[in-house]
Image: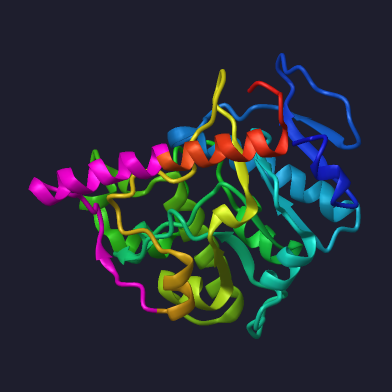
Amino acid sequence: MLDFIPKLFDYTVLSTWNEGQQIPRGNFEVLQNQIPKIPGYTNRNYQRFTVARGLEAARSAGCDYVLKWRTDMLPTKISVHQLLDWAQFSSPAGVKSRIVIPAFRNLSVQPDVFSTIPDLFSFGHIDEMSKLWGDEGFNYTLDWNMSLADQKTLGPELLSSQSLADYYCAEAELYAIYRSRLAAELGSELTHKMVAENYLRLIDHNKLGILWFGGQSGFRSIGQAWEHPWWTEKIWEKQNAPIHPFGYRTHGLIGRLKRKISKIKIRSEISRQEKIWRDTFPGKII
């Protein structure tokens, strides 16, 4: 990825840690950051910190549009012009662009603070990306960050629930903070459905021909837990996504069937990545 991305963009930054990291060489700037003492649930503070530092570097370098991407993911069909077209599609009033993200892992629930958006990759004007990933007002001494308004909405019972880390997962925190910042700037109340339809551009991640490398070898599936009613690009286009109760679960025969279908979809996506690898890098072993 670090060989490929700098060929497409004017400026690339690798934002990582300063503790025992082996840094590759290439046409990119390296930021070695101090690891936050509190990782946050599922290490959410770590990702927020590195991305925020990368955004600061991009702004200092004069970048107007930025792509947040993982180093273990390689897009084989990415086009900067296509990303810009998606970001600038019917640009809503009050913002510099839409934010382009995968449709997968978008879920509208009630209460809205538990709705989710994916954290795998995102693209947009740097001002909008800073609303999504910046850390102004973010408290790295906490396991999770949530606005006072959202805490009031949930109430003490949910806030003290042992399942809060699951309900308010990293994808939910990413959404809730972004929605709160966007609503404050626009001076209006927003919901996940309103945000997704009017301020994001949801895409099918398969259009980018993504290879997501496993920890040791092989590939990982971007699509997971397909038993959940995630948004799709078609749902985004039709603007007909339903709103579900939080803590969505599948039970009984239908639940078992959906989980079985999910496993089939995951195997299918990994097989698709293997084919992309063979066609793109013939003779090379992953």
| Left or right placement of residue 42 versus residue 216 in this view | left
Colouring scheme, one of rainbow, by chain, secondary structure, one colour: rainbow
How many numbered badges does the structure rendering display? 0
| Left or right placement of residue 151 versus residue 23 in this view | left
| Residue 2, percent from left and from top | 79, 35
Residue 244 lies in the magenta stretch: yes
| Residue 101, percent from left and from top | 58, 59
Residue 119 lies in the magenta stretch: no
Instruction: Identify whether 236 is placed above or below 139.
Output: below
Q: Residue at x 68, y 66 (%)?
A: 128
Q: Which residue is drawn at 47% across and 42% down?
A: 269
Q: In which quarter of the image is residue 263?
A: top left
143 or 170: nearer the eye?
170
Q: Which residues, given as a range, are shown in magenta?
A: 240-267
In the rendered image, the residue lying farthest to the top is: 20
| Residue 122, percent from left and from top | 63, 55
Q: Residue at x 72, y 54 (%)?
A: 78
Quadrant of image for the N terminus: top right
Instruction: Identify whether 3 is placed above or below 82.
Output: above
| Residue 267, percent from left and from top | 40, 37
Q: Residue at x 33, y 45 (%)?
A: 225
Quadrant of image for the C terminus: top right
| Left or right placement of residue 246 versus residue 180 in this view | left
Instruction: Identify whether 59 is placed above or below 265.
Output: below
Q: Quadrant of residue 199?
A: bottom right
